Amino acid sequence: DCRTMQEVRRGVDRLDERIVELLAERFRYMEAAARIKPSRDAVRDEDRKSDVLAKVERSARKSGLDPVIARGLYDSLVEASIAYEFERYDATR
């Protein structure tokens, strides 16, 4: 029900803050995964990536978000997560 760009921007800023908090939480799970996985080869799991992207597409459809947009965003997020997990894995071994 926004009537001004100021209202739109406030809403977007508020959402961005929540999204960043959730991303920080997600990356803490990547730290745990790096600690738990038995080998460096286990860090990249293409089956898991495919599963995550499929779930994101289903969730996007349910939420009214274009699944192509969601998949693109999450593909980047998952790749960044994998890179971070490799970094953390290497730092702890």
Image (cartoon, grey):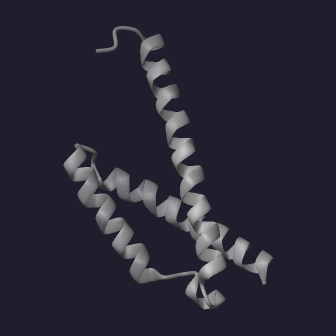
Q: What's the residue at 62%, 90% (across, down)?
A: 38
With respect to residue 16, does 26 lie above or below? Answer: below
Number of numbered tags placed on the structure image:
0
Tell me residue 41's x, y (percent).
60, 90
With respect to residue 63, does 50 lie above or below? Answer: below
Tell me residue 15's x, y (percent).
47, 32
With respect to residue 67, does 90 lie above or below? Answer: below
Give the quarter of the image for residue 35.
bottom right
> In this rendering, would 38 be left or right of 61?
right
Front residue of 7 and 20: 20
Q: What's the residue at 55%, 51% (across, down)?
A: 23
Front residue of 74 and 88: 88
> In this rendering, would 78 be left or right of 88?
left
Give the quarter of the image for residue 84.
bottom right
Tell me residue 80's x, y (percent).
59, 63
> In this rendering, would 63 be left or right of 51?
left
Specify the quadrant that holds the N terminus. top left
Q: What's the residue at 45%, 81% (across, down)?
A: 46
Tell me residue 73's x, y (percent).
45, 54
Give the quarter of the image for residue 79.
bottom right
Specify the quadrant that holds the C terminus. bottom right
Q: What's the residue at 24%, 59% (across, down)?
A: 58
The residue sitting at the top extreme is 3
